[in-house]
């Protein structure tokens, strides 16, 4: 017969538990210590979504373990959360009150749309380096001094990610060279790096593609308006083509004729918040089995 847990863990034991638990082990511990965790207002959530408050989100009966949960950014309940699979932030309103209630993240998927993070908040969300999918659309990550976090620092925290979309991207002239040296546990299937604040040498981008992409990967790069004009895009494309002609990926046929497809077009859209028009260059690397 099961029995309620009537004691409280010593603080040092509690800290050790919080620091080292994964999502699955947390759930197992909840199942054996139900009384303690329920009384402590801690909910283990597989998929947490933070949404705009449109008046339609009803307060759900929160259980110690939940598969899906939606919260508005102004939710002020005292419950804390352990999010162990996916976090999707799709509100532009400040979410600091929600962050203060997320006790631990053990995420595989992080999606944020048009919100801002501090560097420490980003580190907290990707803690454990388990991220498989990262999508930062219209997201600025800043250090405490107000400087934007560079792309290589963002990428350094996600060695297991194979699906990556980052817009905008802040960089230096050494960004792609540095990213080539970052440890990676998997190849990348989908890599879109959009709205760069500077130009790059095409061969450095090409070298990075060789290091991180799979044989059937989609890669896209774009530059912010005012950074890359039509001529710059043309030069970048020609330099990339020259690198490809050297067949450095060891395809049976010349890489440029076998697998490269360039699409260059101007896009004029208004995003919330306003984002300048972009000139993207998309490189789709699709290698058929006979080109391996």
Image: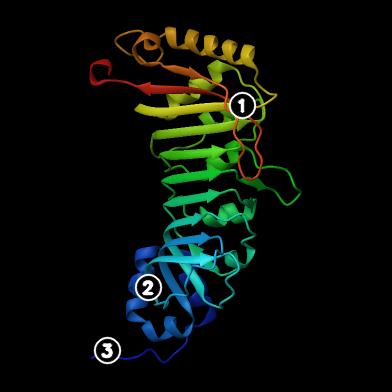
Q: Is residue 11 left or right of residue 32?
A: right
- Residue 65 marker: 2
Q: Position of residue 153 (x, y in %)?
A: 59, 41
Which corner quadrant of the image does residue 172 belong to?
top right
- Mark 2, secondary structure of its residue: strand
Residue at the image point whose x is 41% and y is 23% from the top: 284
Apparent side of residue 226 relative to residue 266 in the rendered image (left or right): right
Give the label, 3 or 2, closer to the camera. 2
Q: Position of residue 192 (x, y in %)?
A: 49, 33
Q: Is residue 197 above or below residue 271?
A: above
Question: Between marks 3 and 1, how big is the CA–CA gap?
Answer: 61 Å
Please say if 282 is above or below 153: above
Label whose residue precedes the other's in the sequence (3 or 2): 3
In the image, what residue occupies the spot 47% across and 72% down? 58
Q: Secondary structure at mark 3?
A: loop
Badge 1: residue crowd in 10 Å (few <14, some 14–19, many ≥20): many
Determine the residue located farthest toward the right in the rendered image. Answer: 145
What's the distance in space between the residues labelled 3 and 2, CA to CA?
19 Å
Q: Which residue is under mark 1?
A: 223
Q: According to the image, label 3 marks what residue?
A: 2
Q: How many neighbours does mark 2 have within 10 angstroms: few (below 14), some (14-19), or many (20 or more)?
A: some
Q: Position of residue 118 (x, y in %)?
A: 65, 53
């Amino acid at each position: 017969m099961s029995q309620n847990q009537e004691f409280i863990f010593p603080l040092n034991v509690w800290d050790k538990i919080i620091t080292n638990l994964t999502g699955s082990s947390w759930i197992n511990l909840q199942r054996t210590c139900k009384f303690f965790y329920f009384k402590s207002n801690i909910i283990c959530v597989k998929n947490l979504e933070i949404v705009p408050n449109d008046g339609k989100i009803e307060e759900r009966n929160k259980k110690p373990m939940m598969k899906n949960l939606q919260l508005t950014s102004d939710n002020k309940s005292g419950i804390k959360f352990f999010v162990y699979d996916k976090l999707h932030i799709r509100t532009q309103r400040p979410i600091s009150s929600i962050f203060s209630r997320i006790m631990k993240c053990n995420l595989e998927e992080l999606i944020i749309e048009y919100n801002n993070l501090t560097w420490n908040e980003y580190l907290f969300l990707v803690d454990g380096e388990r991220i498989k999918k990262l999508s930062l659309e219209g997201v600025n990550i800043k250090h405490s001094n107000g400087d934007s976090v560079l792309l290589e620092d963002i990428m350094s925290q996600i060695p297991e990610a194979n699906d990556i979309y980052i817009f905008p991207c802040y960089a230096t002239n050494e960004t792609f060279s540095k990213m080539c040296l970052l440890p990676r546990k998997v190849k990348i299937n989908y890599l879109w790096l959009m709205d760069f604040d500077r130009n790059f040498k095409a061969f450095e981008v090409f070298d990075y593609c060789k290091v991180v992409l799979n044989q059937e990967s989609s890669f896209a790069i774009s530059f912010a308006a005012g950074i890359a004009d039509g001529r710059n895009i043309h030069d970048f494309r020609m330099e990339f083509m020259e690198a490809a002609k050297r067949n450095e990926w060891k395809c049976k046929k010349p890489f440029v004729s076998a697998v490269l497809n360039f699409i260059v077009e101007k896009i004029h859209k208004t995003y919330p918040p306003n984002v300048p028009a972009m000139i993207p260059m998309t490189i789709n690397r699709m290698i058929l089995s006979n080109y391996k």
